[in-house]
Amino acid sequence: MIAEATKTTRIWILEDHEVFAKQIRRLISHESDLVCPHHFSTAADLYDKLKFTNDRPDLLLLDLGLPRRSGLEVLTDIRSLLPDVKVLILSSSDERENVYRAICNGASGYLLKSADPDEIISGIRDVIAGTSALSGPIASMILQGFARYGPVAHIEPLTNREEDVLRFLVRGLIKKEIADELSISQHTVDMHLRAVYRKLQVRSQTEAVSKALRQGLV
């Protein structure tokens, strides 16, 4: 009986730090079932590749600190353009807001660049297998963010428009973008946000996103 050939997973990298990108490509090259044919320094380079060829990755390793267009914006684009492509964040940022926005916008995992090589390869394989990959500090941050609110509790119901504003907030949009999406003024967005914060009993966007996710509000 002929053994079934091992499927090769194609990985692309969007990372503006050339030295780090080369290190990751070298790391991937040591794995027999992983290949990294392309590395892009800017989002524009990635979009040009997608526009002019039918070549597609199975997994995109995405940095957040990119020039001109942030990694969070690229993440939203990729989830819309290529919904079957998995995205794994590989970033030096451990800011709570960036982590929440990345996970809320469809990232399959979030690894810190300080992770050791084995953890990065393991994270890549976890995502390929359909599970999540989180660096230890990131997992702890998310659990602490959810746990701080205690048991899921009843909250005052949100209006339809407040739910719309909260949904866009979870997706990572800023006030101006929310206003444009809903065809309302930024002042009106502020009014709805104040109501959302009051009803959720939170004081910031990060807390609102965390509680909304924990309570299944979006």
Image (cartoon, rainbow, N blue to C red):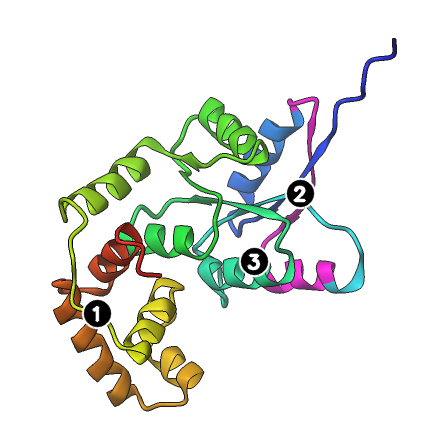
Which secondary structure, mark 3?
Answer: helix
Question: Badge 2: how crowded within 10 Å, few (<14), some, or many (20+)?
Answer: some
Where is mark 1, residue-wise? 157
Question: Badge 3: how crowded within 10 Å, few (<14), some, or many (20+)?
Answer: some
Q: Residue at x 77, y 51 (%)?
A: 55
Q: Any mark on residue 58, and which?
A: 2
In the rendered image, is residue 54 in sight?
Answer: yes
Residue 90 within the magenta-colored segment of the rendering: no
Residue kind at label 3, given as amino acid type = Arg
Q: Nearer the viewer, residue 180 or 64?
A: 180
Disc with the residue nearer the chain's start (1 vs 2): 2
Which secondary structure, mark 1?
Answer: loop
Identify the residue at the far right of this view: 1
Disc with the residue nearer the chain's start (1 vs 3): 3
Q: Residue at x 72, y 50 (%)?
A: 56
213 over 27 or under it: above or below:
below
121 over 14 or under it: above or below:
above
Q: Residue at x 27, y 50 (%)?
A: 214
Identify the residue at the far top of this view: 1
* Tag in front: 1 or 3: 1
In the rendered image, which quarter contains the C terminus?
Answer: bottom left
Residue kind at label 1, given as amino acid type = Pro
Q: Any mark on residue 79, and which?
A: 3
* Tag in front: 1 or 2: 1
Find the magenta span and give its range.
30-50
Question: Badge 1: how crowded within 10 Å, few (<14), some, or many (20+)?
Answer: few
